[in-house]
Amino acid sequence: MKKKYKLHKETEKEYNTEMADNKENTSSNNDKYQGLIDEISDSDTAKAEANFGKNSDNIDKTLPETVAKLAEMQDKYLRLSAEFDNYRKRTLKEKMDISKYAGEDILLKIIPFMDDFDRAVNHLNETTDYEGMKSGIELIYNKFGDFLKQNGVEEIEAMNSNFDVDIHEAVAKLPVDEKMKGKVVDVVQKGYYLQDKVLRFSKVVVGE
């Protein structure tokens, strides 16, 4: 029993010695790694400080130039804003003038027909030549018709044609022969095209 106990004591002593060695090695390795970490951290810190110093110098050099460019851009913006505001006011006035005086050209061309009618009315009170008066009025009528054609206005043909809701407006119906059913039998008011658009519908009487 005494020998066995002694053996255990020796084994325990060896185990403690081995554990102490391992602890010493671990502590040594930790110190080594910590030294490397500290070295790397010091190096990175030094590099960061150096870069910051360089960037700070660059900022100090470029700051006046940047401020000058910013002031120039702001001036350009203010000028552009003022020009646009003037353009907007000018175009608005032009649109108002166009709307107000849109018919000026056409009215200047119509006024001569009014002059012709004035002369005809004055002559009507002084003459007994009714045939000559009739010819004069027909001349004015034909002249005005030519003027309308020159400006793209043409009469819609309606009489005896098939009733068409796209160009005709029925104001009455009239019993007629079988062959005239659905056709225009009378024109109450003429209709007109402006180019290819219906300017005014023809008011017509339709046979039924």
Image (cartoon, grey):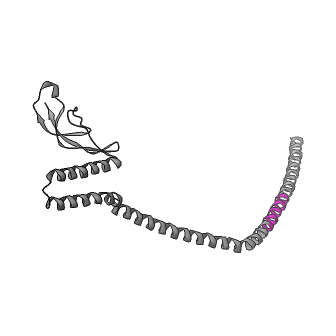
Where does residue 47 sit, x and y in percent of width and height?
A: 81, 64
Residue found at the very far left of the displayed protein: 175
Q: From the viewer's perspective, tell me whether residue 36 is left or right of residue 186.
A: right
Q: How many marks?
A: 0
Residue at point 34%, 61% (across, down): 104
- The residue shown at (22%, 39%) is 168
Q: Main secondary structure of the magenta part?
A: helix
**Residue found at x 28% / y 48%:** 145
Q: Quadrant of the C terminus?
A: top left
In the rendered image, the residue lying farthest to the top is 178
Residue 191 lies in the magenta-colored region: no
On screen, residue 121 above or below 7: below
Figure check: 120 above or below 177? below
Residue 63 position by quadrant: bottom right
Residue 45 on the magenta span: yes
The spot of residue 18 in percent (x, y) is: 88, 48
Between 106 and 71, the one nearer to me in the picture = 106
Which quarter of the rendered picture does the N terminus lie within? top right
Tell me if residue 15 comes above or below residue 92 in the rendering.
Answer: above
Q: Position of residue 109 (x, y in %)?
A: 33, 57
On screen, residue 125 versus residue 155, left or right, reads left
Q: Position of residue 128 (x, y in %)?
A: 12, 56
What's the magenta region? 34-50
Judge left or right: residue 170 versus residue 97.
Answer: left
Q: Nearer the viewer, residue 12 or 204?
A: 204
Q: Is residue 196 above or below residue 160?
A: below
Depth check, front residue: 194 or 82: 194
Res 176 → quadrant: top left
